[in-house]
Structure formats: structure tokens, C-alpha cells
Amino acid sequence: MLRGADVVREAAAAALDFELPETAVEWLEQGRSIVWGELLQLRSTHEELSSAYPDHARRLRELSAALEDAGATRERSSSALLEHTGGADEGSLFTFAKQASSAMHRMEETRQEGADRLRTLAIERDDLLHEIRRFPGFERFLLQKEFSQFAGPVVGWQPFLSPLWKCVVKPVLDALAFSSPGDLSRIFWCPTGPFTFLPIHATGLYDPAHSPLGHQVYDFVVSSYVPSLSILALSRNPITPPSDDLRLLAVRQPPSDGQSPLPGVHKEVERIKAIIKNSPSARTSLLESSAGTVEEVLALMKETDWVHFACHGIQDTKDPTASGLCLADERRLKISDIIALSRPRGGLAFLSACQTATGYKDLSDEAIHIAAGMLFAGYGGVVGTMWSISDEIAPDVARDVYEQLLENGTRPDYREAALALHEAVGCLREDENVSFDEWIPFIHVGL
């Protein structure tokens, strides 16, 4: 194990040499706390497995307990034998030698029996795990986490957001005469280069020494991002008046699609349905399970006014146009599919998924992300995410946005989505239990 730790570190260093930092992190994680990790696996309760496949969960608990007990029994047996032979005095040396020889023989037999039992139990447990991993949603059950499962911003946000506010954002607001906090003028950010990856909408001074109002960008403006000025101009062009009814397509990831589970998506879409049900001018079409194939979703996107995705989002760093949204048929609705879509201009696309507005670092000015693809497809505004989001937070954001857009009972205007998101995220900012990492990712793109 000592040598193994060196091998892991050397492998991680090699991964870094080949510019594979995610792989390096995954390998380092696999080589850390191996013993503790195995013990924790044996003692895990596996609530999700118990709910979906109770018989397999029960058998796994039995095998795990037997493995732990078998290991402890081997140690107890060896200690007892040594303790028994260690009590002889000098006057019974011959007897002691016979007892020791017999004890050593029994100890070897005990160890061999224990090793055989451990091996049998381990093989049986391993076979059971392979069977469990064939179940939808349990493909990585008790496997080491991939980088994407524990990756996320870990920098201290306050020292990062403050200089960006002082040196970049506040001078822009001053030049535009947006100097009165609370007025909430609308601003469209069209950043270039490395600034395309920075959360301009969240800049400010967050230390307690400053007053709550007047030291953050959201005190002055409602922020939206645009990939180019031409897209903004196109979005402003008049469109054909929509029908009286709002047609919303809600696509959620089903629980058995081969992806890691997202328990919050069911709650999220049910909340949206309940909100829309109370609005006489709106109706919703809900796709889920096997109905939500790429072809069917694309067809319905042409027929509906708004679309809401509650699913996994994938940012493909090797082929940016292959980035997309994971649907029920284990395929992605790719950027290349989206930009080929021809639909009436206008409407809202709400992308409640990870990394839908992340972009590609080598082509920062090209805005190659899913949110931009939705704009090119004809949607007037998009709610997207700059990085991974919390499955617990996302349903709350969606609920608050739709409640504000539909609060008057009249047909909602997608151009009010930026303000609705601003208010929804504002509730998160004020919640001391919500971290910067959880509210900053949500952004509005477009008109």
C-alpha cells in the first residue's frame, strides 16, 4: 500500500503533464483512504437501492456484514490462540512446546479457513455489485466518484468579486449613469476573451463592512448576457403575435435513463405544472420517460412557445458542438441539433441543467454553449447556468421565476424573465444557508 500511494501520485503527476487535471484528481481520489473507503462501503445503508431494489439491498447488507465479521473473527481467533499458549511457565517447557506447535497448526488452519471464507464472500459480493450496476441509475454504484461529481468552484468568492467590481463593473455603471441603487435598469453584458467566463452579474463588495445596498451590481441593474450584438438586435425585431394560450413544453429526465439520478427534477416540473394550472391563459405539455426522444423534443419545440428542460447538461470539451442536454433515450439534444431548429422567433428557454452557458475556453468569443444555441434557434431569452448547479436549489429557482412571470394571470412576457430570475436569485442571496457557488451559476441570456 505504501508503494501504491507513490504510484498513484506519480500517475496523477503524469496526467497533469498531459494537461488532464480532471483525470489527475480522479486518480488521486482513488488512491486516498482506501481502507476507510472499503469499511465505509461495508457499512453503507444504501437507501436509494433499498427503495428501488429491496432484495438486492438486503443481500448486499448481509454480505457486507459477513465480510466485516469474517475479518474480525480471523483477528480474534489468532489472538485467542496466542493468548492460550502464552500462559505456560518455565517448569512445563515441554508441554508449552507441544501446545505451541499444536496452536500454530490450528492458527494456520484457522487463517486458511478465514481467508477462503473472505475470498468466497468477496467474490459473491463483487458479483452482486456487477448485477446491481446493470440497473438503470446505478451504473456507478459504490464506484469511485468521477471528477464531475465533486468538481466545482472552491475559490474564495469575496476577494475575487471585489476587484472585478471596483475595476470593471462599477466604472461601467458610473459611465452609464446607473448610480442610484434600487432603480434596477436593464443591462446587457457582451464580454470578450476571459471575461466571458467571469460572473459579472455577481460582482460587488460582500464583506460586512459595507452596507447591504449599493455595493453589488444587482443593486443597480438586472443583468443579461448576449453572445453578440447582432443576436441582441435580432431578438429585438418584431415577431408574429403569439396565440392567446402559452404552450410550454416541459422535459424532465426520467429516473431510469442510465444517468445519475436527479431527484429534484420531478418536484421541479410538478411545481411548474401546478403554477401554470392556476393561470387560465397557459397550458403545458409534459414529456417524460421514453416519450422524450431527441426527435420528438425537437418536433415539439417547433410547436410550443416556451421550453423547460430539467435534466443533465453535458459540456463536451473535445467537441463543443456535441455539448447538450441528456434526454430519455440516453442521447443528447446537442448544440448542433438545436441550431438547426427552425422555429418562430421569441419565447423563453429555461435550461435547468448543469453547464448550459459555460462555453469553450479555446474559443471564448464564439459562445459555443447550449444557451447561445437556443438563441440562434429563435428563442428570445434563455435561463442558463455557468457551471454545475444544485439539484436541491434548481426547483426553488424555477418555481420563483414562473410564479413571478405568471402572477397576473395574463399571458406572460418572456422579456420579463431576466427580472424574474433576478428576484428569484435574490432570495437565494439573502439565505445564509445558500453558498455563493449555489446562486452565482444562474444567468439570463438574450432579451
Image (tube, rainbow, N blue to C red):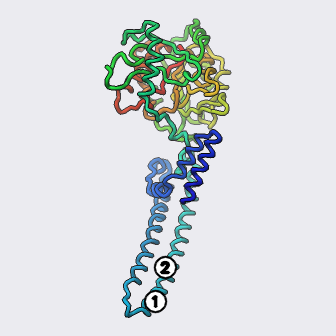
Side (left or right) of 80 relative to 385: left
What residue do we see at 36% from left, 15% from top? 214
Callout 2 secondary element: helix
- Viewer can see residue 286: no
Residue 107: numbered disc: 2
Callout 1 secondary element: helix
Snapshot quadrant of residue 406: top left
Compared with 30, 177 (above or below) is: above
What residue do we see at 62% from left, 17% from top? 376
3D distance between C-alphas at marks 2 and 1: 15 Å
Side (left or right) of 402 relative to 333: left
Q: Residues within 10 Å of mark 1 (few under 14, many from 20)?
A: few
What residue do we see at 62% from left, 44% from top? 15
Which residue in the structure is indicated by mark 1? 97
First in sequence: mark 2 vs mark 1: 1
**Residue nearer the viewer, 328 or 191:** 191
- Viewer can see residue 364: yes
Residue 162: numbered disc: none
Side (left or right) of 44 relative to 365: left
**Does the CB distance between marks 2 and 1 fall below 8 Å?**
no
**Residue nearer the viewer, 184 or 167:** 167
Compared with 103, 123 (above or below) is: above
